[in-house]
Image (cartoon, rainbow, N blue to C red):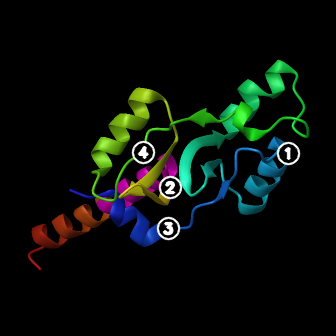
Amino acid sequence: MKYVQDILKTKGSVVYSVEPHVMVYSAIEQMCDKNIGGLMIVENGKLVGIFTERDYARKLILKGKSSKDTPIKDLMTPNPFTVTPQSSIEDCMKLMAGKHIRHLPVEENGKLIGMISIGDVVKHIIEDQKSTIAHLEQYIAGQ
């Protein structure tokens, strides 16, 4: 069984975040610059929310708000679901599918140490399956 820590070893533990008072426009600029779909919202070193492209589309654009005049705290999803490095990839998939979410902050001892996306999970599963197939092919070939 594979774990979140295996994804973080490959992906790294860089966490992109902003504070709750930051305007949505600035957050979207950062997401664009970093080519990411979600930002962690951190206040005084503590994870307080998450902001994603889905939040932008559904809570700002469709409601006619201005991204330059709206603080991210007004749109963020507060108290997001989190996982630990010891969480299994299977449990993450179940959580993401069951709650219809695409990003999971990774915390350890109350500290934000990373973030995984559904893309990270799928990529890891595909690589794991490729490895299993290669081992089975070697076994069948008698090597």
**What separation in Å lies between label 3 and label 1 (alpha carbons)?**
25 Å
Quarter of the image for the N terminus: give it. bottom left
Looking at the picture, how far across and down is residue 39, in whole percent?
Answer: 64, 50
Of all residues shown, which one is farthest toward the left?
142
Is 25 in the magenta? no
Check contact, mark 2 vs mark 1: CB within 8 A.
Answer: no
Residue that appears at 82% across and 53% down: 29
Which residue was labeled with disc 4? 82
Give the number of the mark in front: 2 or 4.
4
Kindly indicate the quadrant of the structure image that contains residue 127.
bottom left
Query: Alpha-carbon neighbours of circle 1 within 10 Å: few (<14), some, or many (≥20)?
Result: some
Badge 2 amino acid: Met
* Mark closer to the chain start, 2 or 1: 1
Label 3 to label 2, Cα distance in Å? Answer: 7 Å
Give the residue at mark 3: 13
Q: Which quadrant of the figure has residue 137?
A: bottom left
Whole-angstrom CA distance, mark 2 to mark 4, is 9 Å
**Residue type at the position of mark 4:** Thr
Q: Which callout, 2 or 4, points at the residue further toward the start of the chain?
A: 4
Within-10-Å neighbours for mark 3: few <14, some 14–19, many 20+: some
Categorize mark 2 by other alpha carbons within 10 Å: few (<14), some (14-19), many (20+): many
Tell me which label, 3 or 2, sits earlier in the chain: 3
- For the record, the magenta segment spans 116-128
Circle nearer the N terminus (3, 1):
3
Q: Earlier in the sequence, mark 1 or mark 4?
A: 1
Which disc, if any, is residue 115? Answer: 2
Q: Left or right of 1: which side holds 118?
A: right
Question: Quarter of the image containing the C terminus?
Answer: bottom left
Element type at mark 3: loop
